[in-house]
Image (cartoon, rainbow, N blue to C red):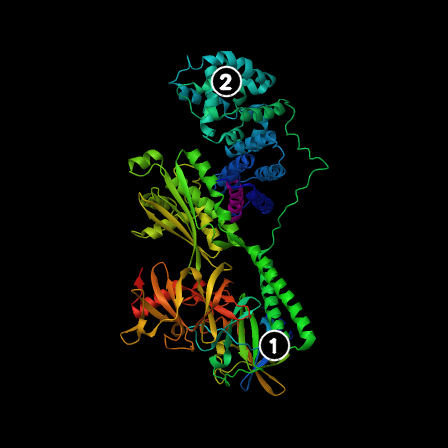
Amino acid sequence: MSIDMQQFHAVFFEESQEHLEEMEQLLLALDIEAPDSEMLNSIFRAAHSIKGGSGIFGFDALGSVTHIMENLLDKIRKGQMAISSSMVDLFLRSVDQLKDILHSYRTNESIDWASVHQLTQQLELVTSGKNQQEADLEKKQGYGFFPKTESLPEDAYGFFDKPAADDSFGFFDDTVEADGFGFFGDLPAAVGQPAQSATESARAASAAVFGFFEELLEPGNTKNASENNPGAGIPAFSPHNIVEIKNLPDPPVTIPTASPVAVDSFEKTVSEKKDPEQKQPIPKQKPADHVSVESSSIRVDVAKVDQLINLVGEIVITQSMMSLLGKSLEGALAEKFQAVANELERNTREIQEAVMSIRMLPVSFVFNRFPRVVRDLSTKLGKQIELLIEGGETELDKGLTEKLVDPLTHLVRNSIDHGIESADVRRARGKNATGKVVLRAAQQGGNIVISIRDDGGGLNRERILAKARENNIPIGENPRDEDVWQLIFAPGFSTAAEVTDVSGRGVGMDVVKRNVQSLGGRIDIESRAGQGAIFTIHLPLTLAIVDGMGVAVGDQTFIVPLVHIVESMQPAAKDIKTLAGEDQLLHVRNEYWPILSLHKVMQLEPQFTDTSKGIVVLIETTKYRFALFVDALVGQQQVVIKSLEKHYKRVQGVAGATIMGDGSVALILDVESLALSVNQTAHLAIAV
Amino acid sequence: MDASSTTDISKEYLTFTLGDEHYAIDILMVKEIRGYESVTKIANAPPFIKGVINLRGDIVPIIDLRIKFNVGAASYDEFTIVIVLHIHNRIVGIVVDGVSDVVSLSRDQLRPPPDFGVAFDSRYLLGLATINEQMIILVDINELISSEEMGLFAFDEK
């Protein structure tokens, strides 16, 4: 399956641009003396969103910078570090740089890695608790390359005690000085201490390198590592050396991933750093005749689109009224008028379709991003995962689709990172070594339901409770499972033992819930220990389109969602059985269906009260089936679902309303809750 | 708001009739005035909620105040008027017998409302005014429409 990721890039660029602008504004508005925690959270979330997106698309320069920014912001918002104006300056510079990087990715220009590295170094220094001046000082002295130099040799030795270098590291004697450290000679200050200890023993140098790799390199994430990497040591390895390292018995398996590409990019960095006088990277030269990025899409306020849709609806109605008027004309004029009216009708219909299509997108637009996410994550985490996508054709309002991306990404990442166990554990538990994640969308009654199901270990009740106590979240005695699961949506809540690139910061679920709620939806969790978890997002149908069957009762029309209709028929009197006086059953092909009279439920005056005179529509829901008795069928059509709740309130048995061709309002039936009323009144609904 | 400062500032009110009585509401609440058209009925709604109409794409509930407050006869003809109101970001239409005028009233023209004798609960009344020897009842339409009694808004969501 090949998916064109290109189509999502534009959206990502636009979103990131917005996030950056938001960050900038917030940073500028931030009060250093008393920073508003909500503002810090917003900045943090903006950085997090960019990181998430860049992770998906492999825009590593963005990812690496935002990752460190996120670390620092996390410390600040947790109060572990006080924000200073120099930090804000640094953040603003980072935002500028991120904009440049974004621009480079957008125009397919090469990334200015040198400045990226410099920035990440600065950010890391600040994060590690040193202030800006110290950081600057260090850089002047060339320490920038080896921020933690003093501690390195010792730490590193610990790591290598066992494979004690004799045979394995022999090759360093030949190569290190010649290829590797030679270039450090150009940077006397930088070589300074570390170089001395390093040259004494090649082991130390290599250890420093390995210590570094252990921290930063993750399998399958080559580029990322080289960016995160402030750069110690890598240039010491020519591709030739790397091949040899592969043969080492014990060292981290991640080394081979330091590909020549990574080295190249680093060498670029180094070459710029060689000039000790040059503190700032050369500002990126933007050619005057620079190709401007004309966006092929425009972002329009949803309210404007809604207004357009409504207005077009009005035009359609006015047009049909005009056609009606035209019919009362006579003579030659009538013919001409009719021709014009027909033309107008066709045009308005096309306008309506075009306007409607602005908003509607199949949910696969979102889902198609995930095979890549899953593939990358499973490689990264060394898990075998199979992703199944169901119901991708379900149509969803564009506004909803866009806002679903972030929460879904978080949930899928969570399922893979926390849910699915490693292959060994899975085998030990008697499961298939390949974990399964199912992404599914469906329309259910008055909702769009999107679920993410994994067959992993499920949520850990004890761990969540322990963490909740640790975070001082009030919990009752012996809470129900559902209540426990909801705890994970608290801000800053994470039970992951360590913070990884993938998840564990505790932003995710908080944001997920917020996003889903802002869409007017809700999120449920079902989990069984050892069997997996299901996260279900219920979204309202507002503006979703439904294929429906129009049915008439008295002078009103109702819409029955087509998916629930089995068939419609005019029942023969002999097939209608009466039970306990009033309740009726319909006998169809050896099965009995309870009959529900729509006019009774909706309190209307029907055309027919005798069931055999009207029409019954056989309806099957996920749980029940019944026969709906109506006066007549009006016809099948696609209708736009409008919310009744916007100006009124929810009505039992009604999923929403729609506007018919003549401008009148028709209610859309919520067959699930109708089935329930059958069940309550007649006790007859037959479980499927 | 300082009461004295508002004394001479007059506000504009839309007056309308329910049966024989004259009422007035703050004109800023009024979105538009239109003729009564047939509505789509809603099941299990109280009788004064006539149903919903399509107002340029919005599904808007229509309330007949005459039924709710038992004034006049709830008849519908070509002269029956719907006043469309904008309340708490929602749109609601109220059926009245007729719209009369737009009047300016200052605070000192208002008399306190009686506790009884008018169809509306005094909670929803702002006061009484006399114009051309006609008594006009000022209704706090905002309070009335969003009240629990009307049952228009689902209250658990607030």
Residue at 70% in and 37% down:
A290
Residue at 60% in and 72% down:
A321
Q: How far apart in space, not on screen, are marks 2 and 1 (Cα)?
A: 88 Å
Residue at far left of view: A580
Let me know if marks 2 and 1 both belong to one chain: no
Secondary structure type for disc 1: strand
* Of residues B113 and A405, the one drawn nearer to the viewer in this rendering: A405
Residue at 33% in and 38% down:
A432
Q: What's under tag 2, amino acid-wise?
A: Asn
Q: What's under tag 1, amino acid-wise?
A: Tyr
Q: Which residues are magenta?
A: A37-52
The spot of residue A482 in percent (x, y) is 34, 52
* Front tag of 2 and 1: 2
* Of residues B4 and A294, the one drawn nearer to the viewer in this rendering: A294
The spot of residue A612 in percent (x, y) is 36, 74
Q: Is residue A104 left or right of residue A221?
A: right
Task: Give the labeled residue for mark 1.
Answer: B13
- Mark 1 is surrounded, within 10 Å at the Cα level, by few (under 14), some (14 to 19) or many (20 or more) other residues, namely many
The spot of residue B72 in percent (x, y) is 51, 86
* Of residues B71 and A408, the one drawn nearer to the viewer in this rendering: A408
The picture quadrant where one finds residue B89 is: bottom right
Q: Which mark is residue A365?
A: none
Say which chain tag 1 marks: B
Q: Eyeballing the image, is A216 above or below A417?
A: above
Q: Is residue A484 left or right of residue B90?
A: left
Task: Give the labeled residue for mark 2.
Answer: A241
Residue at 64% in and 22% down:
A275
The spot of residue A44 in percent (x, y) is 52, 43
Is residue A473 something that shows in the picture? Answer: no
Magenta stretch, main secondary structure, is helix
